[in-house]
Amino acid sequence: MDKRRVQVTGGGTYFVTLPKRWAEKWGLEAGAELRLVENGSGALLLVPGRLSGGNRCEISLEGREERELLQRDIISLYIAGYDLLVLRGERIRPETRRAVREIAQTLVGLEVLEETHGTILLQCFLNVRDFPIERTLRRIAAITLEMLSDAVSAFTQRDEELAKDVVERDDDVDRLELVVARQLSLLLRDLLLEEEVGVPKLHFFYYHAVAKQLERIADHAVKISEATLALTSAPREPIVKRVLELSETTKNVVVKAVEAFMDRDAAAANEVLAQRASGERLFELARISAMADQPEDAHPISIVMDSLLRVREYGYNVAETALNVSVPLTPGDKDHGRSEG
C-alpha cells in the first residue's frame, strides 16, 4: 500500500502525488483525465479512463460436454458477471451445441452469438439498468406468492393441471433470481457501478438474500404441487380445512415480511418475528392429525405440511433481513420508510 501526504498550494488547493508505477501501468501522461468517485464509506476512488472490466472468459469443453457440468459452468460464469463466454473444443458435437443453446435460453440476456466447428460464443446483453432491483424483487415476490397460492389450491382440489402449471412457472423465478445474483457480482467487481445502480453494495446484498429466500419458497410451491400429483384420492374435508388455514397464516407471514423489507420498516419486521415461537408446534399437530385422517396419502400430506412450515421460516428470514436493511449505513442517516420507535 502506498501512502501520500496531503499538500496545499498557496491558493488553498489540496493535492497528492500519484505512484509512478501505477501511472505508467495505465499509460497516464500530463493532461490525462481521471475520475474521482466518493463511495458510501467516504473513500475516494481514483479511476483511469483505460480501466477495463475484462469481462471475457474462455472455457475448454474437454471433459465438460455432459449437460449438467456445462450448465453449472455457464451459470457460474453468468453469475460472476462475464459478458463474453468462449467455449472451445476440438470438434463440438451437435448434442453439446444443442445443450448450450438450451442452457442459454434459461438465462436472461444470454445469447449464442457465433458458432464454428470448434467454438461457441455466448454474449450476455443484460444491462443492470434494465432490471432495477426493487422492481425485480417485487416481480419475484409476486410470481412466488401466486405459485404458492395456486399450489395449495391444486392440492386441496386435487387439480393436476394447475399443479403442473406451478411446476413450470418455477423457471421464471429461477431466471430472475440469477439476474439479481449476477447484478450483485458485478456491483462487487465494478467500482463505479454502485453509483449507476443507485443502491449501496450492502443493501444490494440484502436484496439478493431476500430474492434467494423467495426462490426457495417457489421451490416448496413446486414440492406441494408434486405432492398433489402423488395423491391417490382427493384430500378429505378436515385436511383441506387445515391446509387452507395453515397456508393463509404462512402466506401472511411472507407478505408482511416482504413489505417490511421493501419499506425498511423495523417495527413491522418485529411484528412478523413475534409470531415465530408459536408456529412450529401448531404445524406439527396439524400434520399428525391430517396423516391420521387419510393414512393412505400420509407421505404427500406430510410433504405439504412440511413445505408450509419451511415457507413460514423463510418468511421469518426475510423479516430478519428487513431489520438489517433498516439500519442506517452511516451514523446520523435515516433510511426512507424506516419506522422510528
Image (cartoon, rainbow, N blue to C red):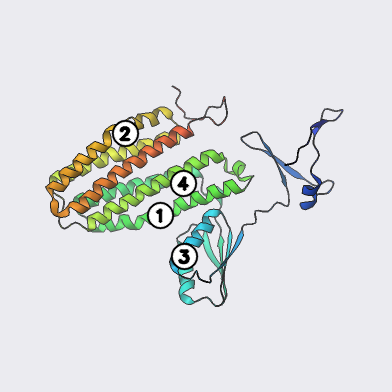
Q: Which residue is mark 2?
A: 276
The residue under label 4 is which amino acid type?
Thr
Measured in 3D between alpha carbons, the distance from the residue under mark 3 to the one under mark 1, in whole angstroms, is 22 Å
Measured in 3D between alpha carbons, the distance from the residue under mark 4 to the one under mark 2, in whole angstroms, is 28 Å
Say whether residue 279 is left or right of residue 293: right
Any part of residue 104 in sight = yes
Measured in 3D between alpha carbons, the distance from the residue under mark 4 to the one under mark 3, in whole angstroms, is 28 Å
Q: Which residue is mark 3?
A: 69
Please report whichever mark, 2 or 1, sits nearer to the chain's N-terminal start.
1
- Circle 2 or circle 1, nearest the eye: 2
Q: Residue 60: percent from the left, percent from the top?
A: 56, 68
Q: Residues within 10 Å of mark 1 (few under 14, many from 20)?
A: some
The residue under label 1 is which amino acid type?
Asp
Please report whichever mark, 4 or 1, sits nearer to the chain's N-terminal start.
4
Q: Which mark is residue 136?
A: 4
Residue in the foreground of this view, choosing between 160 and 239: 239
Q: Quadrant of residue 38?
A: top right
